[in-house]
Amino acid sequence: MPLINMPVDLLLELVNADREVLTEAAVSDTLHDMGVEVEELTATTVYVCRACDNVIEQTKAQGAPLHCAKCGTDFRERTDLLKELGQNKVARLDMLAVRPDIFDPGGMARYMRGFLGVRTGLIEYEIREPKLTLRVDPKLSRPESYRPHIACAVLRNMVLDDDRIKLLMNLQEDLHWSLGRDRKLASIGVYDLATLSDDEQPYSFEAVAPDGLRFVPLGFSPDDAGANMTPGEILEKHKTGQKYAHLLAGFSAFPLLRDGRGAVLSMPPIINSEATRCTRETTQCFVDVTGLSNRTVERSLNVLVTGLMEVMPELVVEAVRIVGPDEERITPDLTPAPMTLGVQEACDTIGIPLEADQLASLLERMGHGVAKSPDGVLQVRVPAWRNDVMHPVDLIEDAAIAYGYENLKPELVPTFTVGAPREIEERSAAARRVLTGLGFHQVMTLPLSSENAAFEKWRIEPDPRAVKIENPISVEQTICRVSLLPGLLETLAINKQYDLPQYLFEVGDCCFVDSDEETGAREARQVAAAMIGTRVGFADIRAVADAFVREMDLASTIAATEHPGFIAGRVAKLVDANGERLGVLGEVHPIVLENYGLKHPVSVLELSL
């Protein structure tokens, strides 16, 4: 969870705009009642990087910054580029990533006013009709340049000073972390609109070749040698490009945002153009959010825009028309999401008696719009900036927070029971004892694998029951494992510098697609053992299998079988009394051993528990 520095003076100013309802002494307790964990109230020193105008806030314990996280300037070498702006009193908040709408003073003040009963219900913000159009290149929906979603807004009548620039940049980076998953799902760009073409010329979000054009990235001066770079060069030479190059790895074309004249705004999700930098003189901005998830992209824009409108009452927000390959949209879209909530369901979940009017009042204090129905069901309108409300139980949690957890009276449950381990856990514990007694050492391997490790290395066809990861973090973790054996052989390969023989085992879950299950997949508990040594053969693993089934009291027999991953004639299957397959044992094929870099014979056993 991130630590957010919330400026206390600004927060009090925004909360008490209508009438004074909050004092500085009560800030910590009020935040606690709202479900926000306060780490400490402290003073910070505010600095600015003269190279890129990045505003940096440090506590006394942290000391002065050594470098700029945005442009990479080393302040130990360039002390002239670090300027101290002054002191600030902040509340350091330990925030949950699911509530980015309260990461900034504007969003937090909006939440506080509702919680304290100053302004309850759904707040409606004025979004003016679009003047600017942006066209989306169909190529961005293809695998070679995939970043298809974009949402935009125009901000006018802005007044920026150091504090507001810091607020804007902090909110941008917090959204990158919380909703954007470090820019993967969503990244935000803010540009000085005065540097761009007028509203009548459509902007474009397009895919360009790595060497298709040149522009000066943020942090570089146009006069610097080599500052005018291609997208490919930015990924290789620019510090930010190197940091986020993995987000565009494998692409043959890169996303690029341009105005009506063709001037470059940014290369999402990497870097903005230096020519569009926002400064203290900026009075109007163009904002874009691009990414892989449309919900995340639109929520990020909604959070940013509404948070700024709370801090800057003079701000005018215009929508932007987005013309995509298949649809036309207007963003930002602040239409609330409709949801229903049964009064009795909420009462049963929280454990308190509530009337419909009481429950509606609690939800309105949390910023929701509520209408009552005669059948005991509330029609709730969820704010478009709330990313965490996805199910009626989330509304119930909001109601409980507004009611106050401290007001709930603890009661003993009416029936007391004694817990007992599940049968599969007892069986797993017994399997561990048996294999430990046979001289094996237990290991635990990763539950995620890949098609290459699970199938190609074992010379078998991919299992159609394998559960695939939709957005894998790496090429080594694309599926849930369907066997424990690949993990055991990888462990042997890692430890091949140690003395032989080595005997390893693992008890763990494998995962398989199953349409009969509620989740669409099921877990199966397996046990596997591996032996490596100069004289290890089928007889050794057969002896282990015989001892294991005897100690586990399993009614099973061994029958001949074939498997591409084992040596022919040295592989067998275990079947139960009904002829159902329980597992496999045998000597691993030399080609499989070569795939793992192993040079000694390996015999393995895997059974279903």
Image (spheres, rainbow, N blue to C red):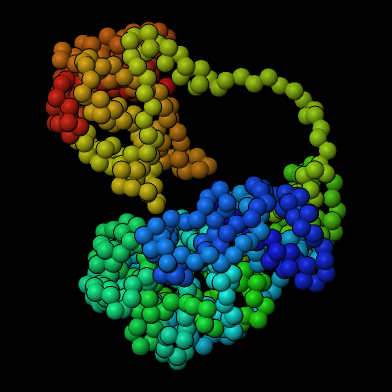
The answer to whether 225 is drawn above or below residue 532 in the figure is below
Q: Looking at this view, is 354 or 367 the one in front?
A: 367
Residue 562 in view (yes/no): no
Residue 40 in view (yes/no): yes
The answer to whether 255 is drawn above or below residue 599 in the figure is below
The x, y position of residue 547, in whole percent, is: 34, 8
The x, y position of residue 454, in whole percent, is: 28, 37
The x, y position of residue 412, in whole percent, is: 80, 29
User: How many numbered callouts?
Assistant: 0
Q: Looking at this view, is 107 or 560 the one in front?
A: 107
Q: Looking at this view, is 475 or 23 the one in front?
A: 23
Does residue 454 appear to the left or right of 537 in the view shown?
right
Does residue 220 appear to the left or right of 159 in the view shown?
left
The quadrant in which the C terminus is found is top left
Residue depicted at 72% across the width and 49% down the height: 32
Q: Quadrant of residue 319?
A: bottom right
Q: Quadrant of residue 198?
A: bottom left
The x, y position of residue 557, in whole percent, is: 31, 13
Q: Quadrant of residue 457?
A: top left
Q: Looking at this view, is 202 or 509 the one in front?
A: 202
Residue depicted at 41% across the width and 79% down the height: 276
Does residue 52 appear to the left or right of 129 in the view shown?
left
Residue depicted at 78% across the width and 54% down the height: 25
Residue depicted at 68% across the width and 66% down the height: 10
The answer to whether 127 is drawn above or below residue 493 in the figure is below
